[in-house]
Image (tube, rainbow, N blue to C red):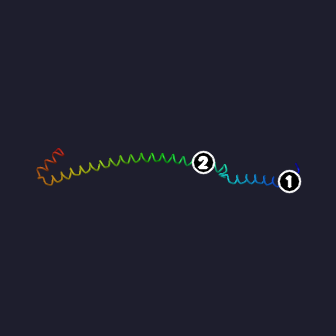
């Protein structure tokens, strides 16, 4: 056995060296994230914070939509008031023209019927 080891010592070392070199190359080639546990915990906490922000943003979007609906209701009410104002203005313009064109008796009867005296 001793003679075998002495004769094949070079080949045995080359084989062991090749295996060690292969293991080292495989370790270098294998991708690893290289992160510590603290880094992973920080990333998980950031993910949780992001999810909380997303949820709060959704709630804010819902409340914004509610306010938009209220604004639309108020705008339609304002539009209706503007239309009614136009109608009233037209009515009083017409009455003003009638009074300007009317004689004294017509104005007197108009005022009596309006103010009932």
Ranked by sequence position, the earlier of labels 2 and 1 is 1
Q: Percent from the top left, x then y, of residue 97?
A: 16, 54
Q: SS for tag 1?
A: helix
Task: Report the front residue among 113 and 90.
Answer: 90
Report the disc number at residue 85: none
Marks 2 and 1 sit apart, C-alpha to C-alpha, by 62 Å
For label 1, count other residues whose C-alpha is less than 10 Å away and answer few (under 14), some (14-19) or many (20+).
few
Query: Is 90 left or right of 54, judged from the image as shown?
Result: left
Q: In the rendered image, which quarter contains the C terminus?
A: top left
Task: Report the front residue among 95 and 107.
Answer: 95
Query: Total number of numbered labels?
Result: 2
Q: SS for tag 2?
A: helix
Residue at screen point 40% across, 48% down = 68
User: Are the residues tagged 2 and 1 within 8 Å (C-beta)?
Assistant: no
What residue sits right under mark 2 in the picture? Answer: 45
Q: Percent from the top left, x then y, of residue 115?
A: 18, 46
Residue at screen point 29% across, 50% down = 82
Q: Percent from the top left, x then y, of residue 59?
A: 48, 45
For label 2, count other residues whose C-alpha is less than 10 Å away and answer few (under 14), some (14-19) or many (20+).
few
What residue sits right under mark 1 in the picture? Answer: 7
Residue at screen point 13% across, 54% down = 101
Query: Is 63 left or right of 31, judged from the image as shown?
Result: left
């Amino acid at each position: 056995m001793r003679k075998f080891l002495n004769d094949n010592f070079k080949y045995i070392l080359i084989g062991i060296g090749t295996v060690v070199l292969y293991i080292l190359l495989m370790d270098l080639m294998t991708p690893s994230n290289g992160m510590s546990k603290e880094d992973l915990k920080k990333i998980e906490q950031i993910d949780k914070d992001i999810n909380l922000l997303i949820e709060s943003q959704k709630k804010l979007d819902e409340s914004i939509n509610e306010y938009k609906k209220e604004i639309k209701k108020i705008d339609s009410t304002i539009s209706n008031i503007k239309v009614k104002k136009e109608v009233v203005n037209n009515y009083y313009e017409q009455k003003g023209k009638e009074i300007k064109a009317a004689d004294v008796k017509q104005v007197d009867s108009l005022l009596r019927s309006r103010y009932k005296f």
